[in-house]
Image (cartoon, grey):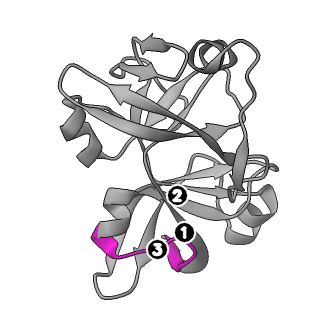
Amino acid sequence: MLEIKVPIGVSGRHAHVSREHLDILYGEGYELTSIKELSQPGQFAAQETIDLVTEKGSFKNVRILGPVRSKSQVEIALTDAVKLGIKPPVRDSGDLTGSPGVTLVGPKGSVQLQEGVIAACRHIHMTPADAEKMNLTDKEIVQVRCGGDRGLLFDQVLVRVSPSYQLEMHIDTDEGNAGMVKTGEMVTVIKK
């Protein structure tokens, strides 16, 4: 059994928006303002926020992550889903078919997404060189062990390989809280 250490990142609820939807939410031609670079090259937390609204609940000031995307999507933890009264599927980013919708509200307008809310599956970003070194392939499923006071074993962790990625595992706030894991800590990938 091979064991490899990787850094972890805990991700809070956030939105990715398309150019079309950003124009509606913030105004024609509006550009996102980066306030913090994220671990993945070219990705950033934007100053801009939106509200998420359903018939049963809402969240205010949800951070938009940039740059703009081809399709808008919202990533939430399953605890968030309870407050919103929806049941998002656990999926890889971008796999939105059949997912529930939500209304995005910005300072200039609102957008009703018919689908687009997911709970992102836990995953590890890595370069082809990282994957080769670890003997892993894109879309492979592995386990990850977290130490600490409430150590646990994450099953069904998706490996995502691209030359544009930086090595890091991503989990949501529910998972981070369950394992008492914080961004930047090291976890152990287990390949059987």
Q: Residue 48, position in %: x, y? A: 60, 37
Question: Could you tell me the amino acid type at mark 1?
Answer: Ile
State the extent of the magenta-drawn residues as a range.
178-191
Q: Which residue is depicted at the point 54% across and 69% down?
A: 8
Q: Quadrant of residue 21?
A: top right
Query: Residue under circle 2?
Result: 170
Q: Dots 2 and 1: beta carbons under 8 Å? A: yes
Query: Residue under circle 3?
Result: 182
Q: Earlier in the sequence, mark 2 or mark 1?
A: 1
Q: Which residue is depicted at the point 23% across and 28% down?
A: 86
Can residue 91 be seen here? The reply is: no
Q: Nearer the viewer, residue 169 or 107?
A: 107
Q: Residue 89, position in %: x, y? A: 33, 33
- Name the outermost residue toward the front: 107
Q: Quadrant of residue 133?
A: bottom right
Residue 186 within the segment the image draws in magenta: yes
Q: CA distance from mark 3 to mark 2?
A: 11 Å
Q: Secondary structure at mark 3?
A: loop
Q: Which residue is depicted at the point 28% across and 32% down?
A: 58
Q: Is residue 126 above or below residue 97?
A: below
On residue 8, the disc is 1
Q: For this view, does 95 lie left or right of residue 37? A: left
Viewer-nearest of labels 1 and 3? 3
Q: Earlier in the sequence, mark 1 or mark 3?
A: 1
Can residue 20 be seen here? The reply is: yes
Question: Could you tell me the amino acid type at mark 3?
Answer: Lys
Q: Secondary structure at mark 1?
A: strand
Residue 16 within the segment the image draws in magenta: no
Q: Nearer the viewer, residue 16 or 160?
A: 16
Q: CA distance from mark 2 to mark 1?
A: 6 Å
Q: For this view, does 47 lie left or right of residue 37? A: left
